[in-house]
Amino acid sequence: MRNAIAAAAIAAALAAPAAAHDTDHTGGIHAEASDAIPAQFDIVHARITTEKNTATFHIGVSGRAGESKPTPSGQLAGSEVFAYVWPTNIDPYEVGFERGTGLLALAVTAHPDFDDTPLFDENGDGNPGNDGDLWHSHWVVLGPDDACGPGALKVIDIPESASPRLPKTWPGLPILIDSPGWDPLIRGGIVEVRVPFDDIGVVEAASYDGVTVGLRVNESIHAPLLCVVDVFDIVSGDLSLPGKVNE
């Protein structure tokens, strides 16, 4: 049901009490805690603030953030991804993609069966290709695709013959994803990412939401490659992007 709500809201976009262990939930958008949602994905607060040229993306949950990660399957096909996501109305062009390609979102993800940050060695073992199970950040461009399920969303695929504009830190996957290497800060019930911008004005003028989701790699490893298969929570309830930066 929530996948259908989210898809409808994306189409339109394109044409709370604090957790006990953290009281920094001023401003932003709020929701009541829910016993029906796993606590590590139960969003009670989302916020984006700016200082000089840096934006801080913040999600607060009712439990311990990042406590659960997908169970390893031992292969890429059909593997799972967990994510904390800030959908925005910022044009994807502002972070290196083509204009108007979909809904730009910052995501903090973990997925033990593959690594999509080839430029970075998150676990510090000298091998940059074995640390997808650690929480890390991405820009992704989202859009609806019923091939992922009725009303479901996906990370936009890149057709085999296409050569779209892509960020310099694009990880080489045939989808609109960037791996910029900004380390998320996860503590207690909080997930935060600090992101620098050349033009902080595009962030200050933006609207946003907060979402927690599960994604899955296609069993055939073909388009659609990466589908949203579970929407755990949407802080606004309807992906209406009600959040205003610095409010």
Image: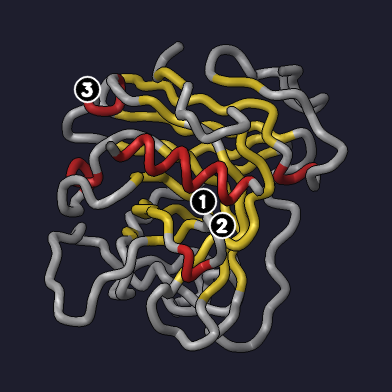
Q: Is residue 181 left or right of residue 16?
A: left
Q: Which residue sits at x=30%, y=27%?
A: 203
Q: Picture coordinates of residue 11 (x, y %)?
A: 38, 43
Amino acid bearing label 3: Gly
* Image-based side of 44 in relation to 14, left or right: right
Q: Residues within 10 Å of mark 1 (few under 14, many from 20)?
A: many
Q: Is residue 145 above or below residue 244?
A: below
Q: Check disc 1 and report its element: helix, strand or loop.
A: strand
Left or right: 128 in relation to 1: left
- Residue bearing mark 3: 201
Q: Are marks 2 and 1 in contact (CB under 8 Å)?
A: yes
Residue 9's x, y, as percent?
46, 38
Foreground pick, 181 / 78: 78
Q: Nearer the viewer, residue 53 or 68?
A: 68
Disc number for residue 135: 2
Measure the alpha-carbon separation of dots 3 and 2.
28 Å
Which residue carries the number 1 mark?
108
Q: Residue furthest right?
A: 35
Q: Amino acid at mark 2?
A: Trp
Of tags 3 and 2, the one toward the viewer is: 3
Is residue 221 toward the left or the right of residue 28 in the image? left
Of the image marks 3 and 1, the number of the one nearer the N terminus? 1
Front in this rendered view, residue 232 or 7? 7
Identity, as a three-letter code, of the amino acid under mark 1? Val
Q: CA distance from mark 2 to mark 1?
A: 6 Å
